[in-house]
Amino acid sequence: MKIILAEDTSYMKEEIIFTLKKFKNEGNLIGDEKRNIVKFFNLTDSTLNFKLFRQRNILNRQGYKLYRKSKARLSFEHAQFLISKNFHTPKPVAYIERYDFSGLAANYYISEQLNNSTIFTEILDDLSFTDREKIIRQYASLMYELHNNGIEFVDNSPGNFLVKRIKKEYLIYLVDLDKMNFYDKIEPKKRLKNLAKLTKDTEILSLIASEYAALSGIPEDYCLKKMSKASTINI
């Protein structure tokens, strides 16, 4: 078993290994278990989020063993990179890879549990949510900053953003980080196609287009047209 910890979390190693042994039968489950399994555990000094990426395909298992980075490792490295660029994501703690004769059998990404936050999906679905428009516009601003830094957040779905209110301000955290692309520059069409993955709702797209246009200088009608068209197909 390979375990890599962030520099300031090495003291947690033994407790993390102990927690891993009871992962299957204990912990607080988040969401369902259809794809991956996510649970949080209360440790001595903190609450940690454990995400188990399942490996079903034997060819993929070999690929991860020989030449591909595991999803857990990508999540860990991408989280560190985002934080270095002053974006928000739950603090990365460690990643763990377990191998057997077939290759990568399991891999875990461990981060600090973000409490008192709201999934962006709930905000989009609740028309009466306090400051809903403000948060949607803030999301558009976040995506603009990501794009300006050459970052394409591939899994741009509302379930992969957590919103946390601190006094009168909101912080938006990115989660599910294994699929990200990095460029020197992202062209407008690619930016808008990426934005369109969030939703097909025309009201939400209009708000995003308005904010993104104001920040980027791209005409608002062009933003909305391209986003609306892209949202209607399976991207």
Image (spheres, grey):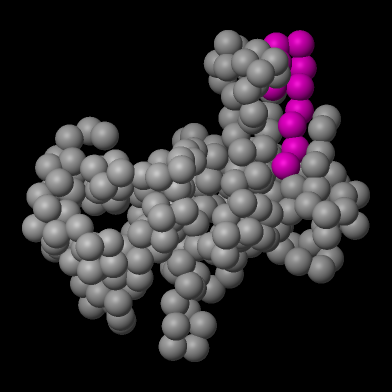
Q: Residue at x 76, y 22 (%)?
A: 99
Residue 165 position in % (x across, y down): 47, 79
Res 98 quadrant in image: top right
Relative to 213, 172 lies left or right: right
Residue placed furthest toward the bottom: 167
Out of 37 and 143, give the one closest to the viewer.
143
Q: Residue at x 24, y 43 (%)?
A: 189
Residue 197 position in % (x across, y down): 28, 45
Q: Residue at x 41, y 60 (%)?
A: 145
Residue 114 position in % (x across, y down): 59, 65
Residue 125 shows in the view: no
| Image quarter (top left, top right, bottom left or bottom right) of the N terminus | top right
Q: Is residue 94 above or below residue 45?
A: above
Relative to 178, 204 lies left or right: left
Type of secondary structure dominating the magenta stretch? strand
Relative to 76, 35 lies left or right: left
Residue 115 position in % (x across, y down): 58, 69
- Is 169 part of what is drawn in magenta? no
- Is 100 part of what is drawn in magenta? yes
| Image quarter (top left, top right, bottom left or bottom right) of the C terminus | top left
Residue 112 shows in the view: yes
Out of 147 and 28, give the one closest to the viewer.
147
Res 158 quadrant in image: bottom left
Q: Residue at x 66, y 46 (%)?
A: 76
Out of 19 and 203, give the one closest to the viewer.
203
Q: Which residues are magenta?
A: 95-104
Q: Is residue 71 above or below residue 133?
A: above
